[in-house]
Amino acid sequence: MREFGYRRAYDVSGAVALLDGDPDARFLGGGTNLVDLMKTGVERPALLVDVRELPLDGIESTEDGGMRIGATVTNSDLAAHPEIRRRYPALAQAVLAGASGQLRNMATVGGNLLQRTRCGYFADVTSDCNKRSPGSGCPAIAGEHHNHAVLGASDHCVATHPSDMGVALTAFDAVVSYETADGPGELPLADFYLPVGETPHLETALPPGALITGVTLPPAPVAAVSRYRKVRERASYAFAIGSVAAALDVRDGRVREVRLALGAVASRPWRARAAERVLTGAPADAENFAAAADAELAAARPLPHNGYKVTLMRNLVVAVLSELAEEAAR
Amino acid sequence: MTTATRGAVGTAHTRVEGRDKVTGAARYAAEIPFADLAHGWLVLSTVARGRVRAVDTDAVLGMPGVLTVLHHGNAPRVDSDFIGMLGVPPDPSAALFQHDRVAHLGWPVALVVAETSEQAREAAESLVVHYETEPHDVAFSAGRESEGYPLDGHLPAVAEKGDLADRLAASAVVVDAEYTTPEEYHNPMEPHAATARWEGGRLDVVDSNQGTSWVAGELANLFSLDPAAVRVRSEHVGGGFGSKGVRAHQVGAVMAATVLQRPVRVVMTRRQMFSLAGYRSPTAQRVRLGADADGRLRVLEHRSLNQTSTVHEFVEPSAAAGRSMYAADAHHTASRIVRLDVPTPTWMRAPGEAPGSFALESALDELAERCGVDPIELRVRNEPAVGPVSGLPFGSRNLIACFREGARRFGWAERDPRPGVRREGRWLLGTGTAAASFPAGVGPSTAAVTAEADGTFTVRINAADIGTGARTALTLVAADALEVPTDRVRVRIGDSDLGPAMIAGGSTGTRSWSWAVQAAAEELRRSLVPGADIPPEGITARSNTAEAIGALAQKERHAFGAQFAEVAVDPATGEVRVRRMLGIFAAGRIVNPLTARNQLVGGMVWGLSMALHEEAVRDRASGGVYGADLAGYHVAAHADVPHIEADWVDDPDPDDPVGIKGIGEIGIVGAAAAVANAVWHATGVRHRNLPIRPDRVLMAGGDA
C-alpha cells in the first residue's frame, strides 16, 4: 500500500490546521472503514490526521431538551448512554444493530456518518465505479445489485449508504456540526448527503477540509416511543438489506406525530416524508400504515434483482409501526 | 453416549498444543521469522480470458525496495506434466508464469518481490500489465447440461443399475425436482502463506497445508528436484477444508527464492483466495425418485452438473451421494462438468456429498410428503441390506440407529407433519431431518515410534493438524498402543522429513495415521524387553500400512448420521433463523470426544451456513467474484448459530483393523437439507435453490 504520513491532533483547530484542506489527507477516527479501504487501495491518502484524542467525546443534554453528541464518541458509548436509551431508543438500537462489539468500540459518530458504501464494485479497485473513478461506469446496474438502491438512485450510481445510526439520526432531524479554517458551521442531516445525480463521487455537503465536531438532536418527545428494525442476511455482523427507524405518538387512536426513516434503500438514510404526511392525523391502523408505506415507495425504481426490497420495506414499515402502536396503547 | 473406552482413546483430552495456541506461542506459516527475508506479492489478471501482451516491469523495478518481478517472460521453468500423490495433476494456476495465456479472472501473471511486504504490495498494485482480451463465458446454469460431459473424479461419474423408464412407469409416486447450489469458498481463517529458501542444497519450505508429503512431492515434481532435496513443514494450520494443497503461493516463493538466493515469503490476501485457492463449484442437480405408494423406492435418479475451468477438469460428484444410501430397483446417477472461463474448483469439505445430499435429502422429504409417510420412516423403509449399486456388504451401517436416537432426543414423535401451521409472534416454526453419509477412506502412511532413554516415547508421523486435533488424537492412540499414560508420549507431525503419510483430507487422516501409529507402537512394545535399559539413541520401531491397506476386504465403508433442525421464518421479511440443530452420527471409534464433537458441530455450522448464507456471485461482465471478501461472502456469524448438539452411537466394525472412521466432513452432509426441510415445514414452501436468502423466502409465492 501507499506510504502515508500520520499526525495526531489534540484540539479541533489543530486538527483542521494539520489537514489544511489537503484533498489527499483524511481525518482518522476509529479507522474501521478508512483503514480497510486503504488496505484495498480504494483510499490512498498521503496523510492521516488522527482525531481520536480530540475533546469531542461527550454526550450532553442541550438547554432546549435535545442532546449533543461529540464526533469522537464511540458507537458503544453512544448506544450505552442512559439518556439516549431513554429519549431516543431507536438510535441506541440502530447503533447496536451495526457491526460487531469490537468494531463499535472503535467506530466513532463522526466517522459513521462518513463511511462509504459497501457496494462490491466500489470496493474492488479493478472494477469500474463512478463513485470511486468518476465517469468509468456503474457495473452494478447490469450486474450484481441485489442489495442496491431502489430510491433516489441514478443511472450513474445505485449504491446504498451503509449506516444504521444515520437512519435513526435522520428520523430525529439531527444536525451535524463541523469546523473549518474559516470557523464553525452546521448542516441538517437532511441536507448533509448530496443527491446522487451525475456526481456520485460527491457524497456530502461538507466544505473541503471540514472536521465533523458533533451531532445535535433537537428535542423530540415522540422519539421516546421509537424503534429500529434491521433485516439482514445473517443475524449479526452484516449490513442491512432493509431497515426502518420509526417513532410514533398516538392519541385517541390517531397519529399525532410520526417519524419514519428507511435504511439500505438509497444513497443516504431515507426520510420517509411522504409516508409521514399520509399518517399524520390518520387512524393508527395497519391499513394506514400500509398506505403510508405505499405512498413512500411509489417513487421506488427497482432494478431487475432488487424488487424484493419494495415488498420488504412495505412489510417492515407496517410491522414496526404496528409494534409501536401496540406499545403506545399499553 | 455409550462409546466404549479403552484407556486414553475415547476419553476427552484437551489439545496438547492448546496452551501454545491460546497464548500465541504457536507460530503460523506467515509468522515464523527468517533472516534476510524478502516478500513476494502476486499480481492477478484483471481480464477473464486472453493473453498477456506485455508486463511493464521497468517502472516497478525502480520503486523502493523492489528486488525482482517474475512473469511468463523470465520465470524459471516448471514441469506440471505429472500425476501427484492424490492421483491428479497439479492445479494449472500453481504452474506459475509458464505461458502468456489467461484462463480466468484472477489468473496469476506476475510476482513482485521486495524487501518488505508493504513495498511488494505497492509495487504489485502499480504494475501495469497489458492484455489481449478475448470474450469470456462464466455463465453457469442447468441449461448447459448438454454442453457438459461426465467425468470420473475420486468417484466414478456414472453408475447405472436397472431399467429407469420401466421402473418409473411402475412407480405410484414420482418426485422430479431440480436443485441448485452456488459457488462456495473454503475461507479458512488463516490465509495461504509460504516461505521458501535454499538451505544446505535442499529446498526448505515453511507452509500452511493439509499434507507436507503431498506438497513436497508436488514441488519436487514441479521443479524437477530429487524428492530427498525438498523439505516442507507445516506445524500449525488455521484451517484448510480442501483448499490447502499446492497453490500459486508456494510455487512463487520457490521461484523467487531460487532467483534471489534468499528466503522469500508469499502470502495470499483474502481477495486473492477467491481466485487462487479453489472453491466448490456451483451445482445444478435433478433428482427423480419413483416409489410405491408406501414410499418404497423403485427409482433413484440423480444427475448433477458442475463447472470447471478451461485448463483443468474437476468434478463435484454430487450425484454419487445416493449410491450407498437407499435401495431402489433402478439406480441411475451421473455427475457431469461444463468448462467455463472460471478458476478450477476443488475439493471442499464433503465434496459431492455436501451439495448432493442437499438435493437428494430434500427430494426424499418431498417424497415423504407426497406419500404421507414420516421422513424417518421413509428412510427406514428404504434401508439397504448391501450396497445398493455395488452389492458389497457394509463394514458397519448404523444409520437407522442414528435416526432413532436423534428422534428421541429431538422430540420428533411429537411433530405435527402439516406445514405452515405453527406460529410464535412473527415467526413460523418448523422442523426437518435428513440423512448423512461419508466414505471411510484410508491412505498408506508410515510412522516411527521411539522408546527414549528417559522413559518417554516419541511418535513421528507426517500427519497434518489443520485445526482438527490430530496431534492430540494420535497422542491418545499411541498411549493406548504403548500402554503408557499420555504424558509420556510426544507426537511430532507436519514435516515431510518424517516420511510419507496420508494428507488431512477426505476424512481419512485420523484413520490412516492412527493405523500406522498403532502398528509401529505395537511393534515397539513387542520388541521392548521389560526392565532392560534403553540406549541413548532409543529404540525405534517403524510401520508402513500400504500392504495392510491393500489387503482390506472390499466393503462399503461409510460413516452415517441423522441431522435435525428447527427453524423460525418471518414471512414478512424473509428472515430464516435456525433455533436448534442435533446431529447423531455413527462414525466408528471416536478417539477424542472433545475434539470430535468440535469437528462435528463445526461441520453442522457449515451446513447451516450453506443453507442460509454462503454464496459467491460471479459477475458475468468481469468474470470475477463480486464482493470477494468476508464482508461480501457471508458465513454464519455467532448469532446465527443456535444450540447445536452433536453426539454418536456405537458403530463397531470388528473386521476393521482400526475401527476409526473420519469425522471431518460428515457433519456438513445433510445439514443444509435438514434446514431446508424445516423451512418447508415452517412455511409450506420448498426452497430448492441455496442459499435460502430473505429475498427468496419473501418473494416465494409458491415453490421457490
Image (cartoon, rainbow, N blue to C red):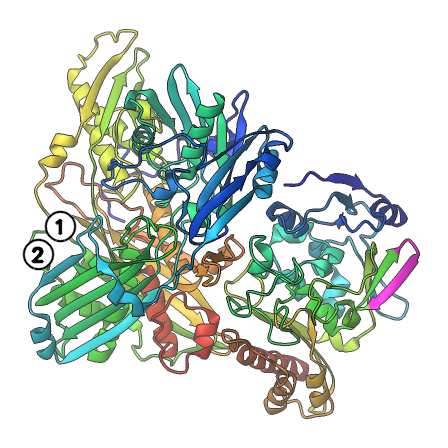
Sort mark 2 into few (<14), some (14-19) or many (20+) by Cα contacts within 10 Å. some
Q: Amino acid at mark 1?
A: Glu
**Side of B535 where A44 appears, left or right:** right
Q: Quadrant of residue A98?
A: bottom right
Report the amino acid beneath label 2. Answer: Val
Where the C terminus of chain B falls, by quadrant?
bottom left
Residue B632, placed above or below residue A311: above
Q: Is residue B676 left or right of residue A128?
A: left
Q: How many labels were placed on the picture? A: 2
Q: Secondary structure at mark 1?
A: loop
Image vertical order of residue B138 relative to residue B219, above or below: below
Residue nearer the viewer, A243 or B595: A243
Relative to B446, A163 lies left or right: right
Which residues make up the magenta segment? A180-187
Overall secondary structure of the magenta section: strand
Residue B702 in picture, x, y percent from top left: 37, 82
Q: Nearer the viewer, residue A124 or B390?
A: A124
Dot 1: few (<14), some (14–19), or many (≥20) neighbours within 10 Å? many
Q: Can residue B634 be spotted in the picture?
A: no
| Residue B346 part of the magenta segment | no
Above or below for B352 versus A320: above
Q: Which residue is mark 1?
A: B556
Residue A157 is situated, as x and y percent measured from the top left of the image, at 63, 68
Q: CA distance from mark 1 to mark 2?
A: 8 Å
Instruction: Output the chain of dot 1.
Output: B
- Residue at 12%, 76% in the rendered image: B168
Q: Which residue is mark 2?
A: B386
